[in-house]
């Protein structure tokens, strides 16, 4: 829940943070993440954790060049390609797709992968008249 708020607050500050896969970045440095979180908790001082998160963001920004809209669009296309590859020809629930992508944040999955793919007509719902159905599954649109 904290990571979701983190992404949301940063995204409101600057839209580029909606495009950074914060959940994935933290997962890649999970040991450091939990160490910083634990130290901040035991010291009753969040500065270690804040510095860690800022360093993760800085490292990512230095590795990722967003020069203009085409770069952002390229990044979005790569997410869609990743989604298509993970789904293959299978019919899957959102949880199953997230598992195949190695994601755990449902909100960022919906924002970055599922909703764009649905709005672009790349995937479709198996129960389109009940989009919130617990039995909802998705497939690549033919």
Image: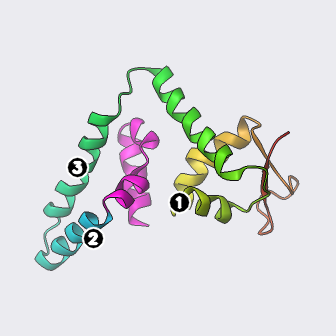
Q: CA distance from mark 3 to mark 2?
A: 15 Å
Q: Of circles 1 and 3, which is in front? A: 1
- Magenta stretch: includes residue 20: yes
Crowding at dot 3, Cα within 10 Å, few <14 / some 14-19 / many 20+, comes out as few
Which segment is the magenta one?
Answer: 1-29
- Which numbered disc, 3 or 2, marks the residue that appears first in the sequence? 2
Taking the image as shown, residue 74 lies to the left or right of residue 1, namely: right
User: Which label was assigned to residue 54?
Assistant: 3
- Magenta stretch: includes residue 100: no
Taking the image as shown, residue 27 lies to the left or right of residue 50, namely: right
Depth check: give the residue in front, 83 or 110: 83
Q: What's the residue at 57%, 47% (across, down)?
A: 111
* Element class at badge 3: helix
* Element class at badge 2: helix
Which quadrant is home to the N terminus? bottom left
Residue 73 x/y as whole percent: 53, 27
Q: Which residue is mark 2?
A: 34
93 w.r.t. 76: above or below: below
- Which numbered disc, 2 or 1, marks the residue that appears first in the sequence? 2
Which quadrant is home to the C terminus? top right
Q: CA distance from mark 2 to mark 1?
A: 19 Å
Crowding at dot 2, Cα within 10 Å, few <14 / some 14-19 / many 20+, comes out as few
Q: Of circles 3 and 2, which is in front? A: 2
Q: Which residue is mark 1?
A: 102
Q: Of circles 2 and 1, which is in front? A: 1
Q: What's the residue at 21%, 75% (across, down)?
A: 38
Q: What's the residue at 59%, 63% (across, down)?
A: 99
Give the main secondary structure of the magenta stretch.
Answer: helix
- Which numbered disc, 1 or 3, marks the residue that appears first in the sequence? 3
């Amino acid at each position: 829940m904290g990571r979701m708020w983190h992404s949301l607050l940063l995204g409101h500050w600057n839209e580029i943070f909606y495009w950074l896969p914060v959940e994935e970045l933290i997962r890649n440095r999970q040991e450091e993440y939990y160490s910083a979180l634990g130290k901040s908790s035991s010291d009753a001082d969040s500065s270690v954790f804040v510095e860690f998160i800022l360093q993760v963001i800085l490292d990512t920004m230095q590795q990722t060049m967003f020069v203009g809209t085409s770069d952002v669009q390229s990044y979005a296309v790569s997410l869609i390609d990743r989604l298509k590859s993970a789904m293959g020809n299978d019919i899957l629930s959102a949880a199953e797709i997230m598992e195949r992508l190695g994601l755990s944040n449902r909100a960022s999955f919906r924002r970055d992968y599922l909703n764009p793919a649905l709005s672009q007509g790349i995937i479709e719902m198996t129960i389109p008249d009940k989009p919130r159905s617990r039995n909802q599954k998705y497939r690549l649109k033919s």
